[in-house]
Image (spheres, rainbow, N blue to C red):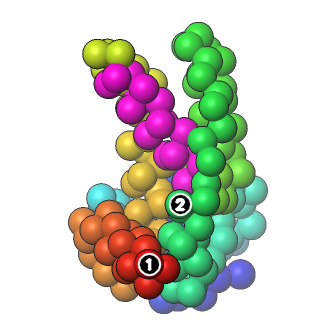
Amino acid sequence: MFQKGELIFYNNSGACRVEAVGPLEGARGADRERSYYRLSLLHGGGTIFAPVNSQVFMRPILSAEAANALIDTLPSIVASGWNERGVRSLSDHYHEAFQSHRSEDLLQLMKDIYVKSQESLRRGKRLGMIDQTYKKKAEELVYSEFSAALGIPFEEVEDYIARRLESREKKKA
């Protein structure tokens, strides 16, 4: 059970802070015997009320060390080469990456879509809408968790990643 003040990753919503744990007060039709988490989304705002014993995926956010270790693996992630164009199979493929709730899988998906976008640009085409939608959602989830883990604003995560990777490359040279 999570405690008030903890930072958690909630399903496919991203990083949240546990604001309260207990029965819902003043909510019509709420089961007074059931305990709920009141979660505040750290990016984008909003509140989620989730039963404590829910089957919805929840986990503690990554530590700063784990987030930095994942960032350090980015150059070694190889694009899968999966290049399906059918709308249904493309959606299913991307949806699968989200169901693992693992930042590693979302980073892989982001890398795959990035490579696909570069190939599309080379051919003078734009990235498809499904690719764009899943890329944006993966970035929101990963960046929200990295923001919370590293204690930096969401808007600075992309620059932080770039600076960290650049710094590591300079050290290697």
Query: Percent from the top left, x then y, of residue 138?
Result: 48, 48
Residue pictured at 42% horizontal, 26% vertical: 119
Q: Main secondary structure of the magenta part?
A: helix
For residue 6, side relative to residue 41 (left or right): right
Q: Give the Cα separation between the discs numbered 1 and 2.
A: 15 Å
Which of the image's four quarters has the N terminus? bottom right
Secondary structure of the residue carrying tag 2 is helix
Kindly indicate the quadrant of the structure image that contains residue 130. Answer: top left
Residue 128 seen: yes
The residue where tag 1 is placed is 173
Relative vertical location of residue 158 with respect to residue 1 in this rendering, above or below = above
Mark 1 surroundings within 10 Å by alpha-carbon count, few (fewer than 14), some (14 through 19), many (20 or more): few
Label 1: element kind? loop
Residue 24 magenta: no
Q: Identify whether 83 is placed above or below 4.
A: above
Judge by depth and name the residue closer to the eye, 137 or 45: 137
Q: Which residues are magenta?
A: 107-122
Disc ID at residue 75: 2
Type of amino acid under label 2? Pro
